[in-house]
Amino acid sequence: MDSVDQPLVHVDRRGHSVDEAVAFYERVYSSTDIHIGDAVTEGFSWRYRAIGDGDVTVGTSSVAARRWGTIEPGGHYVLAWASARGIRLDTGSSEPIDMQPGVPVVYPSDRAFTFDAAPTVQHVIRFERSFLESVAAARRGDLPAPLRFAGDPDPDALRRLQGAISGAAAALLDPATDRARRSALNTTVAEAVVEAFDAAPVAPSGLLSDGPATMRFAQEWMVANARRPITITDVSEAAGVAVRSLQASFRRHTGASPMHFLRQVRLHRVRAELTAADPDATTVAQVALGWGVGHLGRFSGTYAATFGESPSVTLRRRRAR
């Protein structure tokens, strides 16, 4: 479903009960290990506000007490910054992150991590994983895959990210913002995050397996030649193995055929290109045919089943830009 058509997420929760706050934040962070200490002043209060669509949600969290615990990896990449010192992330690691006022950091995204936070306001931007991965893939000309972020972002790129957030914040926090405008701002901020933290796929293709060397070579060869009209014979000759041996190796280690792997490569390449394309100058057919897709109707169905939206929806999302 196009983010322009998705119902807007709009959360504004507050209260004075520690138990309610713990239960709420455990849902937000998919955790069963959130703790809140004594209030710093007379009486305890908390508030969590968030607004966004299926791709990006911006929010603010304020808890008038120390809190600590474990945050589990979920379906989002999280960018956060604090209004004051006192928040430490990844406290159990050898290199914990001490958040500095106004300086964005990316939460560890591939594992659970611990945190310890003083009573302060934290601002958060949550990116749906496939959305940010597609933006990063389009920037690098790669396949979407789980992202790795630089620990020390480039200072100039970080300033550009802060500027992008400042310029987009008012509109993103306004429920009345036009959906096309919101979608464009989502991408602007996402691209700034990718640039500032040099977001890169964990594996160059995101689809390569750890099978035998000949199969790995065949996969890499298909990734490099995905635009060409490729047959199973072409792949087997490039890898230097018989067709039946190559098919058996793929079945044993991936559960699918070599040509299924090629179709997946092309699907991800098409998605990355559609994400970055100008919808007024590009058509889905042009992009798909350019990546060797032979049957557009079948391709559209497979694309929708893989990514949860049609290729035309992916392309239209960039119209406002």
Image (cartoon, helix red, strand yellow):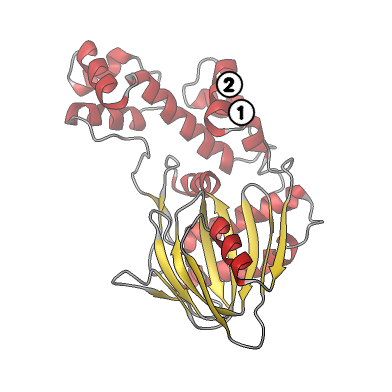
Q: Is the residue marked by circle 1 packed among few (<14), some (14-19), or many (20+) residues within 10 Å?
A: many
Vertical relation: 152 (above or below) 223: below
Vertical relation: 21 (above or below) 119: above
Q: Where in the figure is residue 303, as x and y percent of width and height?
A: 55, 27
Residue located beneath label 2 in the image: 301
| Of the two numbered discs 2 and 1 in the rendering, the one whose residue sits closer to the viewer | 2
Marks 2/1: CA distance?
13 Å
Instruction: Please state which of residues 120 and 239 is positioned toward the viewer in this rendering.
Output: 120
* Viewer can see residue 215: yes
Q: Secondary structure at mark 1?
A: helix
Say whether residue 201 is left or right of residue 5. left
* Viewer can see residue 164: no
Q: Is the residue marked by circle 2 packed among few (<14), some (14-19), or many (20+) residues within 10 Å?
A: some
Q: Where in the figure is residue 40, as x and y percent of width and height?
A: 59, 86
Q: Where in the figure is residue 293, as x and y percent of width and height?
A: 50, 20
At horizontal 44% and vertical 48% (from top left) the residue drawn is: 140
Whether residues under marks 2 and 1 lie with C-beta atoms below 8 angstroms apart, the answer is no
Please state which amino acid type lies under the numbered disc 1. Val
Please state which amino acid type lies under the numbered disc 2. Gly
Q: Earlier in the sequence, mark 2 or mark 1?
A: 1
Q: Which mark is residue 91?
A: none
Res. 63 image quadrant: bottom right
Vertical relation: 88 (above or below) 140: below
At horizontal 25% and vertical 22% (from top left) the residue drawn is: 252
At horizontal 71% and vertical 53% (from top left) the residue drawn is: 182
Res. 224 image quadrant: top left
Residue located beneath label 1 in the image: 284
Q: Secondary structure at mark 2?
A: helix
Say whether residue 169 is left or right of residue 153. right
Q: Where in the figure is residue 199, as x and y percent of width and height?
A: 43, 56
